[in-house]
């Protein structure tokens, strides 16, 4: 009788052990996201593909991999790590691409154009999103990506909006499509709109979505427009910090007002944003060699590409399709608004 009980207990213990999920650690997922980021860099060597940033290519590859092959279970923990920890580290490093002196070069009027454009675009997009029936989280992600700095703003903003991964992928798709349209369209317009290089650079920096897209579009009008457009865009990136902080506070208050648990409402401050501002301060007082800066830019972009690859590996195309056309139309409306509103301000201050 005792032996029978021992066998049963052993069988029960074996069953419990088998039912427990295996712990693989973060490295399989880290390796997978790094491989996808590396593939994204490789694809940029193909003619015409190089106009897309590695971040955009990484999320495209990740989505394709997940929906055609499937994200391995053993990679899950590392994929989540890349979406959270790697992303935050990359945003902190992003601060090393900007100095207070560069912000000063833009001037008071230029900074006013950038700040007013960002605020107006964000408010317009979220307001129109409510009017169109687009989910608040998705509308906020599209608003952030359009008004601040494309894909990196989308994934940074999602640390406080906590929208589903499909919303993140949809928002990234929107800002990629319309930012690419701007990249090809803007260089045709300086003469038509009677914009001097300085004014054209400010317009591009204040309204085009991604840093790489601004660089590609602004330098088409010469080095003066390109240099000023790049600095204007980096100044706009700096505003990512206060926007994410404000959205975090709003999300906290909203959660408390609706009686959600303290766990939902706990983090009012995204601390990595303070790290970003700290790196801006460091870069403003410490002169780094050009070679070191280029390595930092490469590492930052690679880490952001890993984070976006992780987003892709969590994205179901079926769920994306279920979102319909309304968020895409919202992204288009936001693109038209930021282009026209910033142009009006540039003309007024020129």
Image (tube, rainbow, N blue to C red):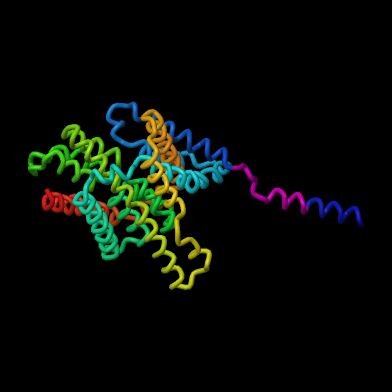
Within the image, what quadrant is residue 90 found in? top left
Vertical relation: 136 (above or below) 275: below
Q: Residue at x 29, y 48 (%)?
A: 236
Snapshot quadrant of residue 36: top left
| Residue that appears at 28% across and 50% down | 146
Residue 128 against residue 338 in the figure, above or below: below
Taking depth in this image into account, of 136 and 340 the one nearest to the observer is: 340
- Count of numbered circles on the image: 0
4 sits to left or right of 302: right
Residue 89 colored magenta?
no
The reply to whether residue 63 is visible in this rendering is: no
Q: Nearer the viewer, residue 255 or 206?
A: 206
Tell me where residue 164 appears, x and y as whole percent.
43, 55
- 333 displayed left or right of 285: left
Furthest-front residue in view? Answer: 285
The residue nearer to you, when weighing 283 against 313, is 283
Q: Position of residue 246 (x, y in %)?
A: 37, 61
Q: Tell me if residue 87 can be seen.
A: yes
> Front-most of 326 and 255?
255
Q: Please state the extent of the stretch shown in magenta in the rendering.
A: 12-25
Of the 4 image quadrants, the one containing the N terminus is bottom right
Up-down relation of residue 284 to residue 321 (above or below): above
Which residue is rendered at x = 51% and y = 47% of the image? 80
The percent position of residue 4, horizontal first and vertical second, equals 88, 54
């Amino acid at each position: 009788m005792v032996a029978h009980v021992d066998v049963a207990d052993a069988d029960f213990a074996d069953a419990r052990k088998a039912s427990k999920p295996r712990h693989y650690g973060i490295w399989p997922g880290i390796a997978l996201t790094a491989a996808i980021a590396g593939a994204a860099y490789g694809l940029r060597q193909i003619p015409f593909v190089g106009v897309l940033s590695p971040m955009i290519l990484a999320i495209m590859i990740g989505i394709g991999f997940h929906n055609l092959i499937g994200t391995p279970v053993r990679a899950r923990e590392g994929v989540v790590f890349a979406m959270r920890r790697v992303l935050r580290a990359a945003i902190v490093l992003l601060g090393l691409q900007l100095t207070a002196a560069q912000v000063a070069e833009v001037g008071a009027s230029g900074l006013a154009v950038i700040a007013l454009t960002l605020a107006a675009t964000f408010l317009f997009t979220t307001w129109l999103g409510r009017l169109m029936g687009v989910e608040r989280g998705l509308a906020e992600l599209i608003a952030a990506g359009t008004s601040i700095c494309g894909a990196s703003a989308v994934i940074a903003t999602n640390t406080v909006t906590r929208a589903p991964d499909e919303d993140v992928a949809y928002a990234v798709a929107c800002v990629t499509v319309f930012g690419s349209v701007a990249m090809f369209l803007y260089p045709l317009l300086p003469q038509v709109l009677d914009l001097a290089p300085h004014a054209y650079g400010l317009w591009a920096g204040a309204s085009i979505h991604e840093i790489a897209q601004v660089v590609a579009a602004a330098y088409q009008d010469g080095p003066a427009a390109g240099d000023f457009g790049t600095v204007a865009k980096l100044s706009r990136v700096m505003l990512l910090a206060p926007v994410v902080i404000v959205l975090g506070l709003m999300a906290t208050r909203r959660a408390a007002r609706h009686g959600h648990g303290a766990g939902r409402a706990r983090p009012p401050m995204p601390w990595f944003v303070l790290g970003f501002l700290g790196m801006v301060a460091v870069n403003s007082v410490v002169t780094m060699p050009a070679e070191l800066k280029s390595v930092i830019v490469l590492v930052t972009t690679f880490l952001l590409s890993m984070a976006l690859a992780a987003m892709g590996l969590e994205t179901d195309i079926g769920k994306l399709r279920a979102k319909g056309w309304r968020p895409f139309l919202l992204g288009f409306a936001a693109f038209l608004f930021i282009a026209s509103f910033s142009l009006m301000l540039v003309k007024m201050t020129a």
